[in-house]
Image (spheres, rainbow, N blue to C red):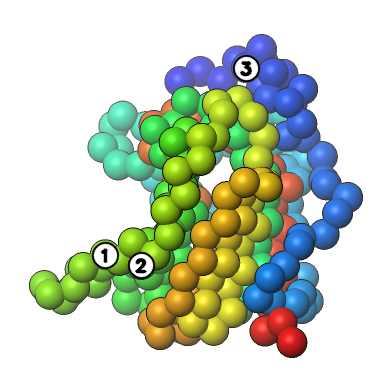
Amino acid sequence: MKFTALTLSILLVSGISGFAGEGPKLTIAKLGPEMAVDDFSGDALSSDWVVAKGKWAIKDGALVGAELESDKHAAVLNLQKPNHNLVLQFDFVLQGVKGFVLSFNHAKGHLWRVTINEEGAQLRKDLDKKDPTSKAIMMADAKTALEKGKTYTLTAEIVGDKVAVRIGDAITLAGSHADFDTDKPNIRFVAQGELVVIDNVKVWEAQPAG
């Protein structure tokens, strides 16, 4: 898809541009040192970002991602910040994607993911592809519509074996599994189709609240 100036101007008017003044509202974590911050004000992605699949580019102060038909795979962008416990916050706009995914891996494969589309969001523990008896586990399912073209803020808290995710004011997802309490090599953003817009990414180390 060609990213036109008109499309991106519409997104910027909707409020995707610029850092929000308020810090994240947390439920299971408290903030530690800042690990990463990016408002995509430069001309190119920093070395912290690694494109695995698809087309990812900075357009008018925001990050735009879409599948490439030739990949025959969803678009994948990794933020190379090894982590164990963290708080992540960013803004996003669904602008035609069939699905937008935030996911975390462990050293040997997929771990868990939040899948977002215009019908709502789901939190799943991923199956272990190396274990034929393993199955994905649905941990939370929010059937709350998300509007195409509207800016939402996602906050994810990861502390030990617990995950809590909030999208805007209407969607909350939470789950716990022993496998979550592990080191993760990066943070993964996945676009299924075209296109998703991301901005104002902030990452902190985290500690358990209280």
Q: Position of residue 169 (x, y in %)?
A: 68, 47
Outermost residue to the right: 21
Identify which amino acid the numbered label 2 is placed on.
Lys
Crowd rating for badge 3 (residues with CA inside 10 Å; few <14, some 14–19, many 20+):
few
Q: Residue at x 26, y 64 (%)?
A: 136
Question: For numbered disc 1, what is the local secondary structure?
Answer: loop
195 lies above or below 80: above
Residue sitting at x 56%, y 29%: 147
- Image x and y of residue 186, in percent: 51, 67
Q: Residues within 10 Å of mark 1 (few under 14, many from 20)?
A: few
Report the front residue among 170 and 8. Answer: 170
The C terminus - image quarter:
bottom right
Q: Secondary structure at mark 3?
A: helix
Residue under pointer 3: 7
Q: In what element is the residue under mark 2?
A: strand
> Residue 58: in sight, yes or no?
no
Determine the CA span between mark 1 and mark 2: 6 Å
Q: Which residue is mark 1?
A: 136
Q: Report how far apart the C-alphas of labels 1 and 3 lie in the structure.
A: 36 Å
Question: Residue most toward the left?
Answer: 132
**Circle 2 residue:** 125
Residue 61 coordinates in the image, percent (x, y): 74, 34
